[in-house]
């Protein structure tokens, strides 16, 4: 395994280059940015200096580049939001893709075999760190953790998924951010909308450990309150529509956790829900934006930003064992799609709409 390159080394190299260039100018120069859009020095030799800088950057020793492999399990708004926020936070921290780091993003298209192939390719390429977005991607990445540090994002239960020994004990060269679904809070929210709610449907992918974990929590919630939970498991996205249609004939409301397979079909589920006049409560704010009625949870931009912060720590030499998993289980908001509420002819309870953490998350916002 090659030695982890640090961003600090790149900064040192850049500072030395600028110092040498400054000595070649005929007079004082402006302070310049490392950005490719930086202002040119105020010198009669500015064109030559710019060319030299370009050549120096293009010929930069590849050992000064932090190579980041990113594997995203599937494309849907929640995971796309995480990656966009991750990329933005890296830039905020001073990392520039193609300058002092290389980000190799791969989409596994919801296929576990693709996850495995991508991870092995990252190992062969000797990436410095692998970022795995969603539980199936993280479980695939864990197979190469002996060789490469792994930072996961949006893993609901990293202990149950076998990624870490405990939230505080990250002794497998793996850590990351958890989007633990507050199942009780979400189902309590459903009861605020529908106090007489009795039969709740649970639609999930049987192959996702995060969803299986949330299923158990939902069962316990319903048992404690004398409610009926009707579950329906699917193995791939092609089965989601039919499963949803069947559930809508049996339940008063549907609950979908932050299940990646089902979330990718959320716009279609929302359409079927409106036809059936059945509300859908979700495990993620983006799923409300895709037509679900409501959830109680976090904004997924926070997951991406903290994942980038962890990559920065690893790049600067902090051992994974000193970076505990960050669980986002506080500072929650109530996200409601008012357009969906209108289509379902639901009046949003005053106790919900007047909550200080109430956020409108209408379709396509």
Image (cartoon, rainbow, N blue to C red):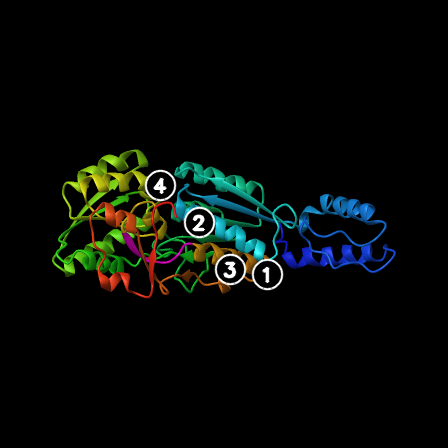
- Nearest the eye: 361 or 216: 361
Residue plotted at (45% across, 60% down): 170
Q: Earlier in the sequence, mark 4 or mark 1?
A: 4
Q: What percent of the width, then of the height, locates residue 104? A: 55, 43
Q: Earlier in the sequence, mark 4 or mark 2?
A: 2
Classify 10 Å Cα crowding around label 2: few (below 14), some (14-19), many (20 and above): some
Q: CA distance from mark 2 to mark 1?
A: 27 Å
Left or right, residue 42 beside residue 219: right
Q: What percent of the width, then of the height, locates residue 318? A: 56, 62
Farthest residue toward the top? 238
The residue identified by callout 4 is 264
Residue plotted at (65% across, 49% down): 65
The residue identified by callout 3 is 320
- Nearest the eye: 108 or 249: 249
**Cβ–Cβ below 8 Å for labels 4 and 1?**
no
Q: What percent of the width, then of the height, locates residue 320? A: 51, 60
Residue plotted at (49% across, 40% down): 106
- Name the disc covering residue 317, or none: 1
- Name the disc covering residue 81, or none: 2
Task: Give the foreground label among 4 and 3.
Answer: 4
Q: CA distance from mark 4 to mark 2?
A: 13 Å
Residue plotted at (49% across, 57% down): 305
Classify 10 Å Cα crowding around label 3: few (below 14), some (14-19), many (20 and above): many
Left or right, residue 245 beside residue 64: left
Q: Earlier in the sequence, mark 4 or mark 3?
A: 4
Task: Give the foreground label among 2 and 1.
Answer: 2
Task: Give the foreground label among 2 and 3.
Answer: 2
Q: Is residue 275 above or below residue 321?
A: above
Q: Earlier in the sequence, mark 2 or mark 3?
A: 2
- What residue span does the magenta drawing correspond to? 294-300
Question: Does dot 3 land on a helix, a strand or a loop?
Answer: helix
Classify 10 Å Cα crowding around label 1: few (below 14), some (14-19), many (20 and above): few
């Amino acid at each position: 395994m090659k030695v982890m390159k640090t961003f600090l080394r790149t900064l040192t190299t850049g500072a030395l280059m600028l110092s040498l260039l400054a000595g070649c100018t005929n007079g004082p120069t402006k302070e310049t940015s490392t950005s490719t859009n930086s202002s040119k020095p105020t010198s009669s030799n500015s064109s030559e200096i710019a060319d030299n800088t370009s050549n120096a950057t293009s010929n930069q020793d590849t050992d000064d580049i932090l190579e980041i492999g990113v594997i995203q399990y599937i494309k849907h708004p929640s995971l796309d939001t995480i990656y966009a926020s991750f990329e933005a936070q890296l830039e905020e921290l001073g990392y520039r893709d193609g300058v002092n780091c290389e980000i190799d993003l791969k989409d596994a298209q919801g296929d576990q075999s693709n996850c495995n192939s991508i991870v092995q390719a990252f190992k062969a390429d000797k990436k410095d760190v692998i970022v795995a977005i969603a539980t199936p991607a993280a479980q695939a990445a864990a197979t190469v953790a002996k060789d490469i540090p792994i930072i996961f994002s949006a893993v609901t239960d990293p202990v149950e998924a076998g990624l870490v020994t405990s939230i505080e004990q990250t002794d497998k060269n793996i850590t990351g951010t958890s989007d633990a679904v507050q199942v009780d809070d979400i189902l309590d929210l459903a009861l605020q909308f529908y106090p007489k709610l009795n039969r709740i449907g649970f639609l999930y992918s049987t192959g996702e450990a995060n969803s299986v974990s949330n299923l158990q929590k939902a069962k316990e919630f319903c048992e404690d309150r004398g409610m009926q939970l009707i579950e329906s498991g699917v193995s791939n996205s092609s089965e989601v529509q039919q499963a949803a249609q069947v559930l809508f004939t049996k339940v008063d409301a549907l609950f979908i956790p932050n299940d990646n397979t089902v979330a990718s079909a959320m716009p279609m589920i929302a359409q079927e829900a409106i036809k059936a006049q059945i509300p859908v409560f979700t495990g993620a704010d983006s799923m409300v934006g895709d037509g679900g009625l409501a959830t109680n949870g976090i904004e997924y931009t926070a997951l991406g930003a903290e994942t980038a912060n962890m990559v920065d720590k690893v790049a600067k030499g902090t051992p994974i064992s000193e970076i505990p998993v960050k669980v986002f289980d506080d500072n929650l908001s109530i996200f409601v799609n008012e357009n969906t509420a209108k289509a379902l002819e639901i009046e949003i309870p005053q106790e919900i709409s007047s909550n200080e953490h109430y956020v409108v998350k209408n379709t396509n916002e």
